[in-house]
Amino acid sequence: MADAVQLGNTAENTDPRVLRSRQMLMEALLRLLNRKEFDDISIQEIADEANLNRATFYLHYPDKNALLQAMTAARFRDLIARRGLSFTDCDGALRAIALGVCDYLAETVGCPTQLTKMPLESSIIPVVEDIFQEGAEKHGITPSADSRMLATTVAWAIFGAARRWHQTPGRMPAEEMAAKIEAMVKPIFLTAST
């Protein structure tokens, strides 16, 4: 399913009509989630709400779960972008990603109740893994280290710590938690870097 929501660098993914249709479908699903439970929403309802036909839905997503995952991933990527994450310099990248995850989870509180109950990690973890995989490829890791395993380990560590933070009443500010996550996760990277 992750392949269905991964956007490569093809002309189709930069075509304004494709991007507009995907955005319309995501916005339609979000509006419907404000009125109904996810399980009670049909693909036809999503298409109708987006003023698109059902066939257009299937041109972009194989099912409504893929649309939900794409919507979650897009929102998370927007939060990461707002933090100015760049792999031209690794300093602060771990903290920026951790802060993005914390921000995402904190903002989920304003979403419909069922979104807070959904397994958001299925959308966030692959995005974080890809960010770390890209960074590992650009900056090199020791030949004995498996960059994909490293990315997975770090992504789950960040998400797990951020989720625990989010579920804690009277929690510390996100920036402070991101610094703590960075301090815990950085040794994993240091042991695998060249």
Image (cartoon, rainbow, N blue to C red):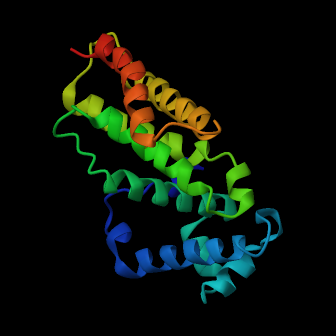
Say if 107 sits above or below 170 in the image.
below
Residue in the image at 39% along x and 59% along y: 78
Q: Residue at x 55, y 50 (%)?
A: 106
Foreground residue, 171 or 4?
Answer: 171
Residue 101 is left or right of residue 95, and the answer is right
At x 31%, y 51%, the residue is 83
x%, y% of residue 75?
48, 59
Q: Nearer the viewer, residue 189 or 13?
A: 189
Vertical relation: 45 (above or below) 134 = below
Q: In this view, which residue lies farthest toward the right?
A: 40
Residue at the farthest front position: 170
Residue 147: % across, % down: 36, 24
Q: In the rendering, at what x and y percent does residue 165 appear? A: 57, 35
Q: Judge from the rendering whether residue 128 lies leftward or rightward of residue 124; answer left or right.
A: left
- Between 178 and 15, the one lying in front of the other is 178
The answer to whether residue 130 is seen in the rendering is no
Q: Quadrant of residue 170?
A: top right
> Looking at the figure, which quarter contains the C terminus?
top left
Residue 12's x, y, as percent?
37, 70
